[in-house]
Image (cartoon, rainbow, N blue to C red):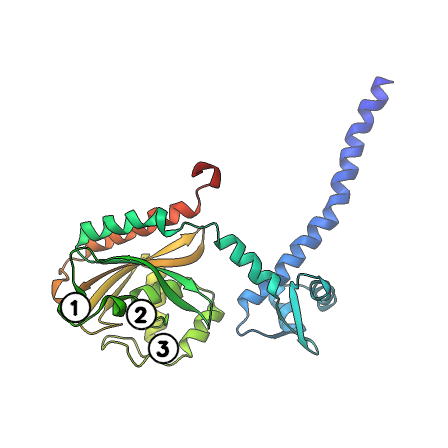
Amino acid sequence: MTSTVNDSVPAQRRHAATASRPASSLAARAYAVQQAFTRLPGEVHTLREIADAAGLDRATTHRILQTGVADADGVFEQVGRGLYRLGTATARAGVQAMAHTPNPASTHHYLERLNRATGGLALLYVLSPLGGARRLCTDYVLGDMDPADVGMTAEDVVSVSRSLRTGASGRVILAHLPQSIQEQVLAEEVPATAGPGVIRDNDALAASLAEIRQLGFGVGRQECMAGWDSVAAPVLWRDSIMGAVLMLKPSGEMPADLRPLIYHTLKTAEDISRLTATPLSAVV
């Protein structure tokens, strides 16, 4: 009797494992369809485009899309015959996830450390999708430096440009975004307020993005404002870009050897990035 029961357990487990495979496979296909939208340029896509990007046949892709459209939360939206885009549920999931990333209270002292180590302005930018891909300054440390001495106000420091086309921080963020979003940003006009060092040629700008990905940081020479140079490094959540740390100094005060400034900027960005991977239980 005991032998019969024990012999049946592996069979039951095998049956349970076999039964779970179709669901797991379906989940993988649904995820592939959702991720296809992030790889395609633009907002609205045809069934054929989505299926090709997901690596699935059109019938399977159509079933997944229609299930997502019918979902009450709106995973996908159908905006025309055979035309789809990501739905509001995807946006809500992104907001929910980002709500648990580090807040200024936990990152400000890193900016203070950067300011002390370099003598430059230390700023934290985050990626903001509102109104297109933009960067937004959420925190900064000016230290003893007075931007008014070189014709700037504190407001200029954080609001001179939100475009990802300009400045070391903008290009660092842009370098880590999907190709589809890069193409959208490269199609934008260069901001009228950009500095004399802004990269206007799209081929040169694309080349600078590849260099940033290779080096892990970016250097700006009067890109956003005349008279100001910068060093920036990415703030990452695993391999996803969240923002950038920016170290900003008057051009005349930038040393010939940028390695110390690059080191401290990278260290700050790495420390803030590490906070995004810290389990909530470890910080409460």
Q: Given contact means CB atoms under 8 Å apart, are the residues at marks 1 and 3 in contact? A: no
* Residue 123 visible within the image: yes
Q: Nearer the viewer, mark 3 or mark 2?
A: 2
Residue kind at label 1, given as amino acid type? Ala
Image quadrant where one finds the N terminus: top right
Q: Residue at x 15, y 56 (%)?
A: 144
The type of residue carrying mark 3 is: Asn
At a point 61% along the width and 61% down the height, the residue shown is: 89
Disc 3 + disc 2, Cβ < 8 Å: no
Kindly indicate the quadrant of the structure image that contains residue 187: bottom left
Under circle 1, the secondary element is helix
SS category of the residue bearing label 3: helix
Horizontally, is 87 left or right of 269 in the view? right
Q: Label 2: few (<14), some or many (≥20) within 10 Å?
A: few
Q: Which residue is mark 3?
A: 202
> Label 2: which residue?
159
Which is more toward the observer, 183 or 207? 183
Q: Farthest residue to the top: give it.
A: 2
**Residue hosting label 1:** 148
Would you call the spot at circle 1 few (<14 residues within 10 Å), some (14-19), or many (20 or more)?
Answer: few
Q: CA distance from mark 1 to mark 2?
A: 15 Å
